[in-house]
Amino acid sequence: MCALGLNLLLTIVETIAGLLAGSLALVADAVHNLSDCGSFIIAIIARRIGRWPSDELRTFGYRRAEIIGALINLTILTVISIFLIYEAVARFFDPQPVRGWIVVGAAAVALAVNLVTTTMLYAVSRHNLNVRAAYLHNLGDSFSSFGVIVAGVAILLFGIVWIDSVVTLLVAALILWQSFPDIRRSIHILMEGAPADVETAALLAEMHAVAGVAEVHHLHLWELDEHHRALEAHIVVESDQLDRWTVIKQELKQLLGERFDVRHSTLEFETRDETACQPCPPGRGRSC
């Protein structure tokens, strides 16, 4: 909440200063700070919803609320960056006068505030995609504010007005470069993709290597959120191994937990002569 209050105040100060100075980079920084305020609100709401317990409608709980919040924030950040690139390119063809001292003063204040909020968010952002999205907003702002200071100094010393647009382009490009990996990660989780560090073929091979397992099919592996994985599969055992099925199950669950960090697994056991389980469609293999 402190970070939210600081960014709201900073947005107002930078907007007024940017309009007075005629600096696109400073206005861009203010707009970016405004998006930070929205990102904080979304992150806070998503984090609280994500802690709700499971119920009859959401049997897995509400963990993915934070992933949705992260995707919303990152998408907003991307749209803003693309808009700033457009405005910066337009300024090359229609240069505007810029008052350097106002730019440097406002950007220096902004840099100090952004460094404080970035530091506040850093520790949690390492383990939470939702908070990381808000952290990236502030990290981008820190670079933006520093770039605006550089632009203001260049304008004061050398009268290079176009440096304002160059800084805007560099900051927007940096933000996009930082955002895309987390956008892909968020979408991958929401699409129930397998964990990036797990090769399905290797997982299947190790499950098959457990004594008593004749075949594994209908395997589904996905992430509930960044820290929770789930798996379901059909395990075929030979008829003479049926009396060991509980032992086989425990060995499989231990394997999945220790080797692949899968703590939630649902295993259905069957024999080769069962007809209730339909084979996978052609081309789908064992992980259909």
Image (cartoon, rainbow, N blue to C red):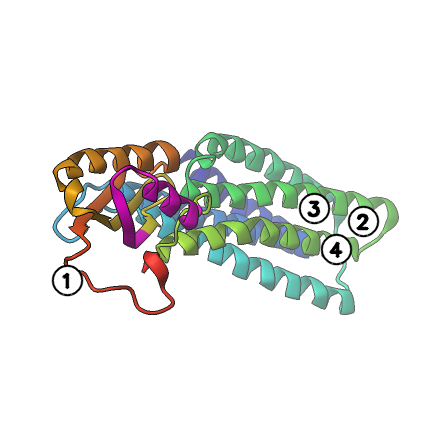
Q: Position of residue 220 (x, y in %)?
A: 30, 53
Q: Nearer the viewer, mark 3 or mark 1?
A: 1
Give the residue displayed 50% in from the left and 40% down from the top. 135
Q: Secondary structure at mark 3?
A: helix
Check disc 3 and give the amino acid type: Val
Q: What is the distance, in whole Å, between disc 3 and disc 1 at their CAs?
A: 69 Å
Q: Tag 4 or tag 2, which sits nearer the N-term?
A: 2
Q: Nearer the viewer, residue 239 or 47?
A: 239
Q: Position of residue 39 (x, y in %)?
A: 44, 48
Q: Which residue is mark 2?
A: 155
Q: Secondary structure at mark 4?
A: helix
Quarter of the figure that contains the N terminus: top left
Quadrant location of residue 86?
Answer: bottom right
Instruction: Check if residue 211 falls in the magenta segment.
Output: yes
Check disc 1 and give the amino acid type: Thr
Q: Tag 4 or tag 3, which sits nearer the N-term?
A: 3
Looking at the image, residue 164 sits to the left or right of residue 201; the answer is right
Res. 275 mark: 1
Give the residue displayed 70% in from the left and 52% down from the top. 170
Quadrant location of residue 173?
Answer: bottom right
Check disc 4 and give the amino acid type: Val
Please state the extent of the stretch shown in magenta in the rendering: 199-220
Give the residue displayed 86% in from the left and 44% down from the top. 157
Q: Tag 1 or tag 3, which sits nearer the N-term?
A: 3
Res. 148 mark: 3
Looking at the image, residue 167 sits to the left or right of residue 276; the answer is right
Q: Nearer the viewer, mark 1 or mark 2?
A: 1
Q: Tag 4 or tag 1, which sits nearer the N-term?
A: 4
Q: Which residue is mark 4?
A: 166
